[in-house]
Image (tube, rainbow, N blue to C red):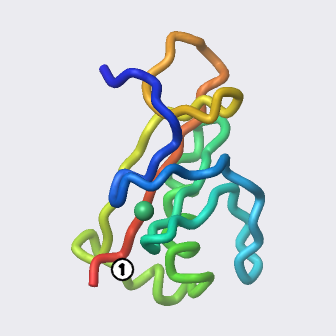
Amino acid sequence: MARPRPLQCPFCDNYLRAPIDINVKGIEVTGGICTCGAVYVLDRTAHNVGDIFMDGLTFVCRGDIDKALTLGPEDYESEEYDYDQHANRIGRTSKTGKVGKIIFIRLVN
Ligand SMILES: [Zn+2]
């Protein structure tokens, strides 16, 4: 079980700011972009991870949903963490009901 730690990119170890609301060509996401090209998206309730993941793929394609739909598992890497919005920390926490999911996605090649 991972200890909570600051929000950090799993691909390049860059420290990241808290997710913000972003509109990418009509797709509403809450997340951000790392300097390495990875994106992160937040699912506040952790109940819509499938939808949020699709939004994340669209986001990493800079809003190009047609490209996002053609991506296969070999085209990207992803990591998923529990996320504490109040502390801006990822990892497992003992608090219930306040933990969302944060998903990092980076295109390969
Ligand atoms: Zn990064």
Query: Residue at image x 61%, y 45%?
Result: 43
Q: Position of residue 102 (x, y in %)?
A: 52, 45
* Residue type highlighted by circle 1: Leu
Where ligand 1 lies, by image quadrant? bottom left
Query: Residue at image x 66%, y 39%?
Result: 44
Of residue 9 and residue 80, the one placed in the foreground of this image is: 9
Query: Residue at image x 44%, y 29%?
Result: 91
Task: Work out whether 91 lies above or below 61.
Answer: above
Task: Examine the image and state in which quarter residue 85 appears.
Answer: top right
Of residue 101 and residue 5, the one placed in the foreground of this image is: 5
| Element at label 1 | loop
Q: Position of residue 21 (x, y in %)?
A: 77, 58
Whether residue 50 appears in this view of the structure is yes
Residue at the front extreme, as displayed: 14
Identify the residue position indicated by label 1 in the image. 71
Query: Residue at image x 51%, y 36%?
Result: 6
- Picture quarter with the N terminus: top left
Q: Position of residue 76 (x, y in %)?
A: 32, 71
Whether residue 78 appears in this view of the structure is no
Task: Examine the image and state in which quarter residue 87 appears.
Answer: top right
Of residue 100 and residue 54, the one placed in the foreground of this image is: 100
- Picture quarter with the C terminus: bottom left
* 33 left or right, relative to 81: right
* 26 left or right, relative to 89: right
Q: Position of residue 12 (x, y in %)?
A: 35, 59
* 71 left or right, relative to 27: left
